[in-house]
Amino acid sequence: MDAIMEDAHWLGIEWEKVLYSSDFFDLLYEWAIRLVKKGKAYVDDQSPEEVSRTRGDWNHPGIESPWRNRSVEENLDLLERMKNGEFPDGSRTLRAKIDMAHGNMNMRDPIMYRIIHEPPHHRTGKKWCIYPMYDWAQGQNDAMHGVTHSLCSIEYEDHRILYEWYLDALELEHKPRQIEFARLNLNYTVMSKRKLRRLVEEGHVNGWNDPRMPTLRGMRRRGYTAEAIRNFVARVGVSKTINARAGVMVDFSLLEACVRDDLNLHSLRKMAVLKPLKVVIDNYPAGMVEEFDVLNNPEDLDAGTRKVPFSRVIYIEQDDFREEPPPKYFRLAPGREVRLRNAYFIQCNSVVKDENGAVVELHCTYDPATRGGDSPDGRKVKATLHWVSAEHAIPAEVRNYDRLFNNPDPEASGDFIADLNPNSLEVLEGCLVEPSLKDAQPGDRFQFERLGYYCVDIDSTGGRLIFNRTVPLKDEWAKVEKKG
RNA sequence: UGGGGGUUCGUCUAAUGGCAGGACAGCAGACUCUGGAUCUGUUUGUGGAGGUUCGAAUCCUUCACCCCCAGCCA
């Protein structure tokens, strides 16, 4: 309960007061007595099995209970004794007297109260031995509290007739109205509590707040903002369309677009190298350190600037160098010149390989005239790379998250566990981030330039930095490369 | 073989008798010190068949398909 309120609050929902239906059990009980007195409810002595068996099915009417026509006095007496705990669990129920042949199963003398002695209710303790069914509590609570529009999802549509029957039978002056809307499903994930619980209990994810979980706590830990989620919901809209799982199936990419929209405007830019490749700038003086003033957020100049150190040995992303560049690859390659973001143009002259032939180090030269990132002679480069200074960078762990399932609709498949994406979590150790990130706190959000949006994970402790990828930046090159 | 709902681009959603529009995704291009952002262009849709009407996504008839319901769960 506290967790729900905390999540709601995080989302930006405010409330004046919180009401518990258990605080109104007395009034509800009085109303039940009113129905008994009107001959609209009766105590049934049938066992759960008998009630189930005599309900009939879609094609056959149910059978009326032998206890259906007891006198009002007897019903009142029995109900009172049920309440007082004189009977064991399951021995009796209070049922509304409606129509055992009704086409809508909800109307076949629905149970209003059943007997439950254990475990005690979390708010009322042992005061009550009978508890109302959902249908018998919902509309009555709405009426008690002056609710005008009671919103719910469309699987309750065939409960509305019962909702209204109770209200009409009680003849209250205020009658609330139930209105149903479609549920919102996301593709490439599961939303049902049962399935989410299985993911947690079987260890497919690391708890309810695993950043891959479509729970509010999961999304929050992943770095999604409340603003982005609210905007997403607003952009999806509200309808009664039913395409899947009693609702609509929304593209995950729309959620991601909303997250990017928000983060693009508000997050500070940083440089981080996830898979480092050492680069030695041969003509840069050893021991020299320059500090460049770098914009914190080009979308928001008020965010100011910061200092980023540069030196002779730096690291760039392994993906940003190809010994044999494919067509349309603009980044670094032997003999090619690119820009180091906010710093200098560099040209690659030679490559150092290990015994396996893997590239482990690059030797480059820089052009001092391009300081700050522009060439006075007007020559252009086709790529700009992010980098960190070897001497100044600080180590970090980065967790890249991808969609949890490979199947757009895992709930529709027989075994949704089989549709899990084995690569939904990629843990990268040995990442290097710029020194200004030293004091980043859990929950802080940044854009790692050219990579994506990241936030500091709650697992970060005592100077050990761990970043979660919230959502990657759009990647044109990945698309080009994929197409071949 | 019952009851309750639903069907507009790939997805979500507008248009309630008067030009089928927007967003995301896709594609193409421009621009760019993030192959980011931004901008421009563009493909794709009223489930089917009849009917009413000058005119139908919208009204009528009919067919098809999809979702939910047989807890003393909510």
Image: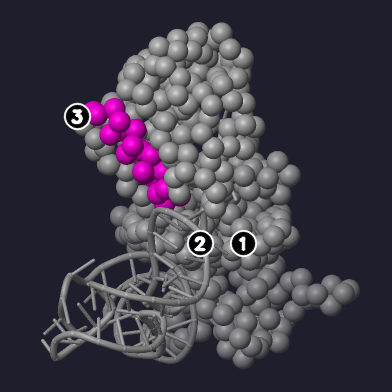
Using the image as rendered, state which of residue A22 and residue A383 is in the foreground. Answer: A22
Q: Which of disc 3 and disc 1 is earlier in sequence? A: 3
Whole-number angstrom distance, CA of label 1 to CA of label 3: 45 Å
Secondary structure at badge 1 equals: helix
The mark closer to the camera, 3 or 2, is: 3
Name the residue rendered at 34%, 57% in the picture.
A238
Instruction: Assess whether residue A9 is covered by the magenta stretch.
Output: no
Residue A76 position (above or below residue A246): above
Determine the chain carrying the residue at label 3: A
Identify residue type, mark 1: Ala
Q: Is any part of residue A131 visible from this angle? A: no
Q: Which residues are magenta?
A: A152-173
Whole-number angstrom distance, CA of label 3 to CA of label 2: 38 Å
Residue A34 position (above or below residue A267): above
Name the residue rendered at 26%, 37% in the picture.
A176
Quadrant placement of the C terminus of chain A: bottom right
How many marks can you see? 3
Residue A244 shows which numbered tag? 2
Q: Main secondary structure of the magenta part?
A: helix
Name the residue rendered at 53%, 41% in the picture.
A62
The mark closer to the camera, 1 or 3, is: 3
Q: Callout 2: few (<14), some (14-19), or many (20+) C-alpha neighbours within 10 Å?
A: some
Q: Position of residue A234 (x, y in %)?
A: 33, 56
Residue at which label 3 appears: A173
Q: Position of residue B67 (x, y in %)?
A: 52, 59
Residue at which label 1 appears: A412
